[in-house]
Amino acid sequence: MDKLSVLSQIATRLADRTDLDERSIREGFFARENINSTAVGSGVAIPHALMDHLPHPTGLLMRLLQPVEFGATDNIPVDLLFAILWPQSSAVDFLPMLARVSRFLRTDIVRDMLRQARSPADVFGVIWFKQKELDEYQ
């Protein structure tokens, strides 16, 4: 599997959760990747796209069994992806949220715990409790 295949798979899953068509989501991700890789290092990527006709933000966390080359500056293949679709109508709120997600996923313990999670409930627990803990330190 390669980066474009992974992004296509994410687009399919997000299309099932929204009223957007898979093609427009995929094109949004590909257009963003053509600007610069969304890999943030340490095996993490945050593919994202601003979308018209999206009523609310939608995301998907995916852990790959086989890491994929994503063009990260640290040259580490990606195995954790947090994909985000954001409404174009509230683009002003997007960058602060993206920065927060990036900071969260740059935390070693968070990445380790997400990689060890065995169920969606485990993932939710990691996100809920670790974000709360990080918020208390800031």
Image (cartoon, grey):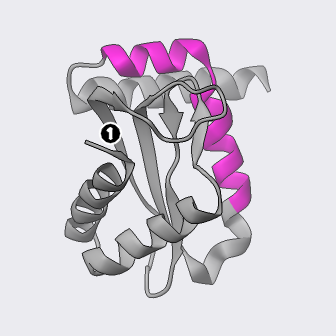
Given residues 33 and 132, the one toward you in this image is 33
Q: Residue at x 32, y 13 (%)?
A: 116
As drawn, 17 above or below 136: below
How many marks the image carries: the answer is: 1
Q: Is residue 65 visible?
A: yes
Image coords of residue 20 (percent x, y) = 31, 80
Q: Is residue 22 left or right of residue 86?
A: left
Q: Which residues are magenta?
A: 95-116
The quadrant in which residue 15 appears is bottom left
As drawn, 115 above or below 56: above
Magenta stretch: dominant SS? helix
Q: Amino acid at mark 1?
A: Met
Q: Residue at x 69, y 29 (%)?
A: 135
Image coords of residue 37 (percent x, y) = 59, 50
Secondary element under disc 1, as helix, strand or loop, is strand
Q: Is residue 6 left or right of residue 92?
A: left
Q: What is the residue that sits farthest to the bottom in this orientation?
A: 53
Q: Residue at x 58, y 27 (%)?
A: 75
* Magenta run includes residue 66: no
Identify the residue under disc 1. Answer: 62
As drawn, 52 above or below 36: below
* Magenta run includes residue 102: yes
Image coords of residue 76 (percent x, y) = 53, 24
Given residues 107 and 126, the one toward you in this image is 107
The quadrant in which residue 7 appears is bottom left
Image coords of residue 89 (percent x, y) = 60, 83
